[in-house]
């Protein structure tokens, strides 16, 4: 059973995607929130992916991501609680917390967005994903040619709270994370 120690707060991380088929990784340090001795973890309640055009020369951001891409394509990102390196993981990976993608069809002026979030089932916070690792990893990739001096910026916004877990739940999550790491 998980009990809240704090109210909800937001964590963010941004990565710039500017090279076709090359993954980029960012990290979010959770060391201040996760404490093994106190069985304290982070409960992730919501994950949002925000996509923007980053004009690198002017250092400005707009919603017009198609202007950063020289062709039709897809930009995608994943949030996980174990380090995938600079690769995107399969959807069945237990460490995948959330994922999002934007499909750009500039020729027909169509832009579609999809995202998902994978909660677990520990106590009253069953709409949350409990994380006991000391970092989260944002990994993204653009499958299109970037326009010179432009990138697609992917910002992940994570609504979370600090929770205290029962000994059984802490061990279950820690074993699952360790097993998935091997």
Image: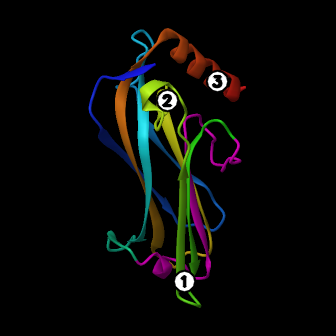
Please say if the residues under marks 3 and 2 sit with CB atoms less than 8 Å apart: no
Question: Which residue occupies the extreme left position in the image?
Answer: 7
- Please state the horizontal and vertical placement of residue 114, each as a whole percent of the image: 55, 63
- Please state the horizontal and vertical placement of residue 28, each as a whole percent of the image: 43, 39
Name the residue nearer the viewer: 128 or 133.
128
Q: Residues within 10 Å of mark 1 (few under 14, many from 20)?
A: few
Which residue is at a point 32% across and 43% down the rendered structure image? 10
Q: Residues within 10 Å of mark 3 (few under 14, many from 20)?
A: few
Q: Is residue 115 above or below residue 63?
A: above
Which residue is at a point 66% across and 49% down the rendered structure image? 87
Q: Is residue 178 above or below residue 20?
A: above
Q: Is residue 89 left or right of residue 134?
A: right
- Please state the horizontal and vertical placement of residue 68, each as a whole percent of the image: 48, 77
Q: Which residue is mark 2?
A: 131
- Find residue 171 and report its image quarter: top right
Q: Is residue 95 left or right of residue 37?
A: right
Q: Specify start and end residues of the magenta stretch as a single range.
A: 64-92
- Please state the horizontal and vertical placement of residue 117, each as a whole percent of the image: 53, 47
Mark 2 / mark 1, whichever is N-terminal: 1
Q: Which residue is mark 3?
A: 176
Please say if the residues under marks 2 and 1 sit with CB atoms less than 8 Å apart: no
Name the residue nearer the viewer: 3 or 64.
3
Question: Which mark, by number, is residue 110?
Answer: 1
């Amino acid at each position: 059973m998980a009990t809240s120690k704090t109210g909800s707060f937001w964590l963010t991380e941004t990565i710039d995607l500017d090279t076709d088929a090359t993954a980029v990784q960012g990290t979010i340090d959770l060391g201040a929130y996760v404490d093994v001795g106190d069985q304290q973890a982070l409960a992730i309640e919501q994950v949002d992916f925000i996509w923007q055009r980053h004009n690198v020369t002017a250092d400005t951001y707009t919603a017009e991501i198609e202007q950063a891409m020289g062709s039709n394509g897809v930009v995608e990102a994943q949030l996980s609680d174990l380090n995938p390196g600079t690769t995107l993981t399969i959807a069945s990976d237990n460490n995948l917390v959330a994922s999002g993608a934007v499909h750009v069809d500039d020729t027909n002026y169509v832009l579609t967005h999809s995202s998902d979030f994978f909660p677990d089932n520990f106590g009253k916070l069953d709409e949350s994903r409990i994380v006991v690792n000391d970092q989260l990893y944002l990994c993204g990739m653009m499958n299109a040619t970037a326009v010179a001096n432009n990138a697609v910026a992917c910002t992940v916004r994570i609504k979370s709270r600090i929770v205290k877990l029962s000994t059984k739940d802490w061990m279950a999550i820690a074993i699952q994370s360790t097993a998935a790491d091997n």
